[in-house]
Amino acid sequence: MKFNDKVIDTQLLAELRDFVTVLSKQEDLEFDYHFGATIHIDDRQITASHFWDHRDEQVRSIGYKTDILLRSIGTMHYTSVSEWQKLKREVRQSSLPYFCEQLFTVLEDVRLEEIIRNERRGTINWFRQRLNTYRHYFETQLNTNITRSYTLDELFCMIFLTVTSESPFITFEQANVQQRETLKRLQPLLESVYEARSTKDVVNLTLDVKEALEEDYSDMINRYFVYPIQHQAAMTEEKVVDELKRVDPLNNDDEEDISDDDEVISETFSTWHRENENSDRNQSFMQFELEQGTKTNLIGDGVRQTEEGDQAMASVQGMSAQTDQSEYEHLESLMKRKIKKRMKASNTVKKIEIQSS
């Protein structure tokens, strides 16, 4: 599949989405590719970094999966939200916000990676290949930043290579003297990352490094990493996994008692005309606005003249129900009176005809 001039491996994408669901145990948590590996709480997404997009197939797959492991197991369960928010508040007033953001992410990932390695021994080779790829990348970036005189970017590359090195002896002969001296001064601080047991330890280490550099450096030019958590609104839970499960309360606290009896609604309706309001409100008729029409004798052979007391009638199909009294008793009486009247009139005519003859 090709999307925005970029080839998407749909099979790998489906695999990574399943990977997110299984590791996070959140069925509605989606996966996507992004600038960095993050948990987007508002969008309910875990993302893998575009950094891996142009690697060979095996490295690309391992890179995406280790990004997901770091966020779905590490950040989601072991990163303190309150400490992360504390860091963001402190950094907001700093002259080195980009540097602090990226340094925190790197140091926290070093801590989380160790936790994941111990919990899931099968991921050790994955993380080793991940580390080799990143180390090669930052060795290249170090030379580029030295050439461009991006001093803090140069120092950041040296810090990354130092804290991820498997050897205690690492030198940067090609680096500028200022950065080498600064790194030497920071060495005792950086070594404490291996003893960090919580996000609070990582935050304090990041702030200590920031204070040591603020007077001598301006902020970084390049952005290699972003915060592992992305959220617009205030977070109230201590763990990211709890924040993802949180359900905000309704704006109102109204309650409604609903019983089965409420499902049956019984109403009576009457028809009326604005010129003559019906005085009998107990009749079971539908109410309409009748503006025009022809009034007819409901029982009889022909039309009759309208009267003020005429009632508009209509038939409505529905379910039958027992009533307390018949609404049509007066109609039956009216029919009997008219039949008697017609019989009387017929007898009178016959008498007159007989007398005339």
Image (cartoon, rainbow, N blue to C red):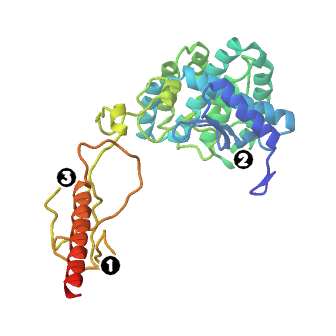
105 displayed left or right of 204: right
- How much space separates mark 1 and mark 2, taking CA atoms? 110 Å
| Residue mark closest to the camera, 1 vs 2 | 1
Q: Residue at x 62, y 43 (%)?
A: 223
The mark closer to the camera, 3 or 2, is: 3
Q: How many residues crowd mark 1 within 10 Å: few (<14), some (14–19), many (20+)?
A: few
Q: Which residue is mark 1?
A: 302
Which residue is nearer to you in this view: 325 or 72?
325
Q: Quadrant of the C terminus?
A: bottom left
User: Can residue 173 be seen?
Assistant: no
Q: Which residue is mark 3?
A: 282
Label 1 – label 3 distance at C-alpha? 29 Å
Sequence-first disc among 1 and 2: 2
Q: Residue 293 falls in which quadrant of the image?
A: bottom left
Q: Position of residue 217 (x, y in %)?
A: 53, 40
Question: Residue at position x 70%, y 24% from top?
Answer: 164
Q: What's under tag 3, amino acid-wise?
A: Asn
**Amino acid under disc 2:** Thr
Residue identifier under label 2: 147
- What type is the residue that disc 1 sits on? Gly
Q: Is residue 215 above or below residue 124?
A: below
CB atoms at circles 3 and 2 under 8 Å apart? no
Whether the residues at callouts 1 and 2 have beta carbons within 8 Å, the answer is: no
For this rendering, which residue is in front, 32 or 124?
Answer: 32
